[in-house]
Amino acid sequence: MINVFPEIKKNFGFGCMRLPMKDGEVDIKQFKAMVDVFMDNGFNYFDTAHGYISGKSETALKAALTSRYPRESYILTDKLTMSYFKKKEDIRPLFQQQLDACGVDYFDFYFMHAQSEDIFKYFDDRGAYKVALELKKEGKIKHFGISFHDKASVLDDILTAYPQIEFVQIQFNYLDYEDPSVESRKVYEVCVKHHKPVSVMEPIKGGSLVKLPEEAQKIIDNLHRNASNASYALRFAAGFENVRMVLSGMSNMEQMLDNISFMKDFKSLDDEELDAVYKVTDVFKKTHMIPCTACRYCVDGCPKHILIPDMFACLNNKKIFNDWNQDYYYNNVLTTKGHSKASECLKCGKCERVCPQHLSIRELLQQVSNEFE
């Protein structure tokens, strides 16, 4: 573990994108109770963004946390999101709105939100990184970071361009670890290369690693550890040396108490548990998925340069997890920079002739097109 940010007491944080709700509003009474339990157990890290719960997350934090606890007792992270500013001059007024909504006069961490190749360019062209660094110099931000959704090579470029970045928040879980559309392992390794501590989002993949397929559940049950499915996912992510923080979006007290039960006195997964989660990953790979091994023989000879294996990975993940990230990767990564859409397939059949798995690639690309286009 990198010895940084001593103000962060533990490696588990409260992600405030999924809060307890009642009649379309945040259930402030329950949220207050959850905040109290969280703080009483020695945890102090809260993560929000201006658009979370249509703007209700920030104000809920003011009601449940910042108006009730001394400022130095908690760590608060907020983010600058692309949809809320059009030019450089919009950033400071927006930042002040965020401070006011949260009821604080500074943020402990402030992230450039959901960075990808295109979004980074949008931010950089409008001087957003420079404004954030100015705000840090003024004491309105203690630490400057990014949250990230793209390929590892893009993150490498961003961290090279802005070595002032102190913290990187990435999607990271045992299913995405080797997934070609998310590249969790590769993205993590880029953070290690640049000596950047990692904050983890989606450690249970939007809840998908809680409700497991029957075959996968049997693997977990056979451990006989009397532990929740969520515990294996969170402990997997938190067990990596460079991971400083793992976030969980908790929407009720039951989830809160379960997470605290294994994160308070944290222990990494042992070898038997690691073997089990990798077997669970194998089950997911077999479940209603295109059995592509990503050998990429099909890509080498494709006259339209279609990223066939990557598209199949997106379709698989979309079907199993209803994962919104797959739409993003398809439309913003896989079909850009000279790579054609699935619908632009010439149906020449070169790919099928070299496929070791003998897949009906032309038909499968039509499925991809129907789903994403």
Image (cartoon, grey):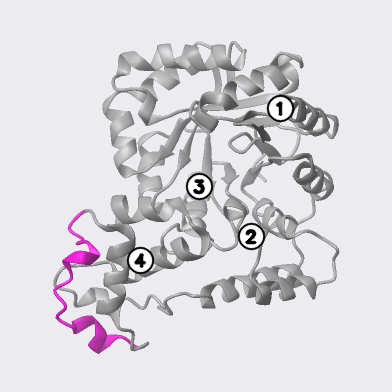
In primary-sequence order, the first of circles 4 and 3 is: 3
Cα distance in 3D space between marks 1 and 2: 30 Å
Q: Tag 3's secondary structure?
A: helix
Tell me if label 1 and label 3 are in contact, CB under 8 Å.
no
- The residue under the point 57% across, 30% down is 48
Q: Give yes or no for residue 269 being in the magenta stretch.
A: no
**Foreground: disc 1 or disc 4:** 4
Q: In this view, does 260 lie above or below 64?
A: below
Q: Which mark is residue 7?
A: 1
Quadrant of res 361? bottom left
In primary-sequence order, the first of circles 1 and 3 is: 1
Residue at which label 2 appears: 209
Query: Could you tell me the amino acid type at mark 4?
Result: Asp
**Foreground: disc 1 or disc 2:** 2
Tell me if label 4 and label 3 are in contact, CB under 8 Å.
no
Q: Give yes or no for residue 346 being in the magenta stretch.
A: yes
Cα distance in 3D space between marks 1 and 3: 21 Å
Q: In this view, does 12 lie above or below 111?
A: below
Estimate how packed mark 3 is, as few (under 14), some (14 to 19) or many (20 or more) residues with alpha carbons within 10 Å: many
Residue at which label 4 appears: 310
Residue 166 appears at what percent x and percent y? 52, 33
Magenta residues, as a range? 337-356
